[in-house]
Amino acid sequence: MTKKKENKEEIKPVAAQDAQADKVSANAEQREEQSKSPDYYDQLLRLQADFENYRKRAEKEKPMFIQFGKAEVIKKLLPLYDTMLKAEAEVNKKDSDTEHIKQGLNMIFEEFNKVFKSEGVEVVCSKGKPYDPMTQEVITTVPCEDKDDGKVADELCRCVTFGGQVLRYAQVIVGKKKEEENQEQKDQKEQK
Protein backbone atom coordinates (compact mmCIF):
# COMPACT_ATOMS: atom_id res chain seq x y z
CA MET A 1 0.00 0.00 0.00
CA THR A 2 2.75 2.33 0.51
CA LYS A 3 3.50 2.28 -3.17
CA LYS A 4 -0.04 3.29 -4.02
CA LYS A 5 0.08 6.16 -1.59
CA GLU A 6 3.34 7.32 -3.04
CA ASN A 7 1.88 7.28 -6.57
CA LYS A 8 -1.10 9.34 -5.45
CA GLU A 9 1.16 11.83 -3.75
CA GLU A 10 3.30 12.07 -6.86
CA ILE A 11 0.27 12.72 -9.02
CA LYS A 12 -0.96 15.60 -6.90
CA PRO A 13 2.19 17.66 -7.15
CA VAL A 14 2.34 17.12 -10.91
CA ALA A 15 -1.26 18.30 -11.29
CA ALA A 16 -0.52 21.30 -9.12
CA GLN A 17 2.53 22.09 -11.21
CA ASP A 18 0.44 21.84 -14.41
CA ALA A 19 -2.19 24.18 -12.99
CA GLN A 20 0.47 26.64 -11.97
CA ALA A 21 2.08 26.41 -15.41
CA ASP A 22 -1.31 27.06 -17.01
CA LYS A 23 -1.77 30.14 -14.84
CA VAL A 24 1.68 31.41 -15.79
CA SER A 25 1.03 30.86 -19.51
CA ALA A 26 -2.42 32.48 -19.19
CA ASN A 27 -0.82 35.48 -17.47
CA ALA A 28 1.80 35.64 -20.22
CA GLU A 29 -0.93 35.53 -22.89
CA GLN A 30 -2.91 38.15 -21.04
CA ARG A 31 0.12 40.44 -20.83
CA GLU A 32 0.78 39.86 -24.51
CA GLU A 33 -2.86 40.72 -25.38
CA GLN A 34 -2.69 43.82 -23.21
CA SER A 35 0.44 44.93 -25.00
CA LYS A 36 -1.34 44.42 -28.37
CA SER A 37 -4.44 46.27 -27.18
CA PRO A 38 -3.00 49.80 -27.67
CA ASP A 39 -1.77 48.74 -31.12
CA TYR A 40 -5.28 47.61 -32.10
CA TYR A 41 -6.75 50.82 -30.76
CA ASP A 42 -4.23 52.90 -32.75
CA GLN A 43 -5.02 50.89 -35.88
CA LEU A 44 -8.74 51.45 -35.32
CA LEU A 45 -8.24 55.21 -34.94
CA ARG A 46 -6.12 55.37 -38.10
CA LEU A 47 -8.67 53.35 -40.04
CA GLN A 48 -11.46 55.60 -38.83
CA ALA A 49 -9.49 58.71 -39.81
CA ASP A 50 -8.70 57.24 -43.24
CA PHE A 51 -12.36 56.48 -43.84
CA GLU A 52 -13.40 59.98 -42.78
CA ASN A 53 -10.81 61.49 -45.15
CA TYR A 54 -12.05 59.26 -47.97
CA ARG A 55 -15.66 60.32 -47.34
CA LYS A 56 -14.73 64.02 -47.40
CA ARG A 57 -12.66 63.60 -50.56
CA ALA A 58 -15.51 61.73 -52.29
CA GLU A 59 -17.94 64.53 -51.39
CA LYS A 60 -15.57 67.12 -52.87
CA GLU A 61 -14.99 65.09 -56.06
CA LYS A 62 -18.65 64.31 -56.74
CA PRO A 63 -19.51 67.75 -58.25
CA MET A 64 -16.32 67.56 -60.28
CA PHE A 65 -17.36 64.21 -61.80
CA ILE A 66 -20.80 65.59 -62.60
CA GLN A 67 -19.15 68.57 -64.30
CA PHE A 68 -16.93 66.25 -66.38
CA GLY A 69 -20.00 64.27 -67.45
CA LYS A 70 -21.80 67.41 -68.55
CA ALA A 71 -18.74 68.57 -70.47
CA GLU A 72 -18.62 65.26 -72.36
CA VAL A 73 -22.27 65.56 -73.40
CA ILE A 74 -21.77 69.17 -74.48
CA LYS A 75 -18.75 68.16 -76.59
CA LYS A 76 -20.94 65.62 -78.37
CA LEU A 77 -23.65 68.25 -78.96
CA LEU A 78 -21.27 70.78 -80.56
CA PRO A 79 -21.37 69.20 -84.06
CA LEU A 80 -25.15 69.30 -83.83
CA TYR A 81 -25.02 73.00 -82.93
CA ASP A 82 -22.73 73.68 -85.91
CA THR A 83 -25.15 71.87 -88.23
CA MET A 84 -28.06 73.90 -86.88
CA LEU A 85 -26.12 77.12 -87.52
CA LYS A 86 -25.53 76.05 -91.12
CA ALA A 87 -29.23 75.23 -91.52
CA GLU A 88 -30.18 78.65 -90.10
CA ALA A 89 -27.83 80.38 -92.54
CA GLU A 90 -29.40 78.41 -95.39
CA VAL A 91 -32.94 79.38 -94.32
CA ASN A 92 -31.99 83.06 -94.07
CA LYS A 93 -30.68 83.19 -97.65
CA LYS A 94 -33.01 85.04 -99.98
CA ASP A 95 -32.75 82.55 -102.81
CA SER A 96 -32.93 79.36 -100.73
CA ASP A 97 -35.19 76.57 -101.87
CA THR A 98 -36.93 74.00 -99.73
CA GLU A 99 -34.62 71.18 -100.83
CA HIS A 100 -31.68 72.77 -98.99
CA ILE A 101 -33.83 73.20 -95.89
CA LYS A 102 -34.87 69.55 -95.98
CA GLN A 103 -31.25 68.52 -96.42
CA GLY A 104 -30.21 70.66 -93.44
CA LEU A 105 -32.94 69.21 -91.23
CA ASN A 106 -31.93 65.69 -92.21
CA MET A 107 -28.33 66.49 -91.23
CA ILE A 108 -29.53 67.75 -87.84
CA PHE A 109 -31.51 64.57 -87.21
CA GLU A 110 -28.52 62.43 -88.22
CA GLU A 111 -26.34 64.28 -85.69
CA PHE A 112 -28.96 63.85 -82.97
CA ASN A 113 -29.17 60.14 -83.70
CA LYS A 114 -25.36 59.81 -83.48
CA VAL A 115 -25.26 61.59 -80.12
CA PHE A 116 -28.19 59.63 -78.73
CA LYS A 117 -26.78 56.30 -79.90
CA SER A 118 -23.35 57.03 -78.42
CA GLU A 119 -24.92 57.93 -75.05
CA GLY A 120 -27.30 54.95 -74.93
CA VAL A 121 -30.42 57.05 -75.46
CA GLU A 122 -33.21 55.45 -77.46
CA VAL A 123 -36.12 57.33 -79.02
CA VAL A 124 -39.11 55.00 -79.38
CA CYS A 125 -41.58 55.59 -82.20
CA SER A 126 -45.00 54.25 -81.29
CA LYS A 127 -47.21 55.46 -84.13
CA GLY A 128 -49.33 52.61 -85.48
CA LYS A 129 -48.41 50.29 -82.60
CA PRO A 130 -50.71 49.14 -79.77
CA TYR A 131 -51.00 51.45 -76.77
CA ASP A 132 -48.44 50.65 -74.03
CA PRO A 133 -49.24 52.22 -70.63
CA MET A 134 -45.65 51.62 -69.45
CA THR A 135 -44.15 54.03 -71.98
CA GLN A 136 -47.05 56.15 -73.21
CA GLU A 137 -49.46 58.73 -71.84
CA VAL A 138 -52.81 59.11 -73.61
CA ILE A 139 -53.65 62.74 -74.33
CA THR A 140 -56.88 62.08 -76.21
CA THR A 141 -58.66 59.52 -78.35
CA VAL A 142 -59.96 59.74 -81.89
CA PRO A 143 -62.58 57.62 -83.63
CA CYS A 144 -61.14 54.91 -85.85
CA GLU A 145 -61.94 51.65 -87.58
CA ASP A 146 -62.08 48.32 -85.75
CA LYS A 147 -58.64 47.20 -86.89
CA ASP A 148 -57.00 50.36 -85.42
CA ASP A 149 -58.82 50.22 -82.07
CA GLY A 150 -56.32 50.64 -79.22
CA LYS A 151 -53.46 51.61 -81.54
CA VAL A 152 -51.54 54.88 -81.45
CA ALA A 153 -52.97 57.16 -84.14
CA ASP A 154 -50.48 60.00 -83.63
CA GLU A 155 -47.64 61.10 -81.36
CA LEU A 156 -47.29 64.54 -79.83
CA CYS A 157 -43.88 63.61 -78.44
CA ARG A 158 -41.94 60.35 -78.50
CA CYS A 159 -40.85 58.14 -75.63
CA VAL A 160 -37.18 58.49 -74.68
CA THR A 161 -35.32 55.80 -72.72
CA PHE A 162 -31.85 55.80 -71.22
CA GLY A 163 -30.28 52.58 -70.01
CA GLY A 164 -33.64 50.82 -70.16
CA GLN A 165 -35.38 53.43 -68.02
CA VAL A 166 -37.98 55.85 -69.34
CA LEU A 167 -36.75 59.46 -69.28
CA ARG A 168 -39.87 60.84 -70.94
CA TYR A 169 -43.16 59.13 -71.65
CA ALA A 170 -44.66 59.43 -75.10
CA GLN A 171 -47.71 61.64 -75.39
CA VAL A 172 -50.03 59.89 -77.80
CA ILE A 173 -53.43 60.02 -79.41
CA VAL A 174 -55.07 56.59 -79.38
CA GLY A 175 -57.65 55.31 -81.82
CA LYS A 176 -60.99 54.16 -80.41
CA LYS A 177 -63.88 52.43 -82.16
CA LYS A 178 -66.60 54.73 -83.35
CA GLU A 179 -69.44 55.11 -80.86
CA GLU A 180 -72.09 54.32 -83.49
CA GLU A 181 -70.62 50.89 -84.07
CA ASN A 182 -70.31 50.27 -80.35
CA GLN A 183 -73.97 51.19 -79.86
CA GLU A 184 -75.02 48.90 -82.73
CA GLN A 185 -73.03 46.05 -81.25
CA LYS A 186 -74.64 46.61 -77.84
CA ASP A 187 -78.09 46.55 -79.44
CA GLN A 188 -77.30 43.30 -81.26
CA LYS A 189 -76.08 41.67 -78.04
CA GLU A 190 -79.23 42.75 -76.21
CA GLN A 191 -81.44 41.20 -78.92
CA LYS A 192 -79.65 37.86 -78.60
Image: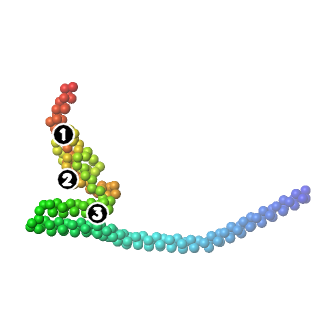
In the displayed structure, would residue 62 be above or below residue 7? below
Residue at figure coordinates x 13%, y 65% from the top left: 91
Q: Considering only order in the chain, which callout, 2 or 3, is on the residue closer to the N terminus?
A: 3
Helix, strand or loop at label 3? It is helix
Helix, strand or loop at label 1? It is loop
In the displayed structure, would residue 118 be above or below residue 178? below
Q: Amino acid at mark 3?
A: Val
Check disc 2 and report the residue beneath it: 156
Give the quarter of the figure containing the C terminus.
Answer: top left
Q: Residue 133 in the image: state x and y as whole percent.
A: 27, 47
Check disc 3 and report the residue beneath it: 115
Check disc 1 and report the residue beneath it: 145
Q: Considering only order in the chain, which callout, 1 or 3, is on the residue closer to the N terminus?
A: 3
Say whether residue 166 is left or right of residue 191: right
Helix, strand or loop at label 2? It is strand
Colour treatment of the image: rainbow
Q: Residues within 10 Å of mark 1 (few under 14, many from 20)?
A: few
Q: Distance from label 3 to label 1 (Cα)?
A: 39 Å
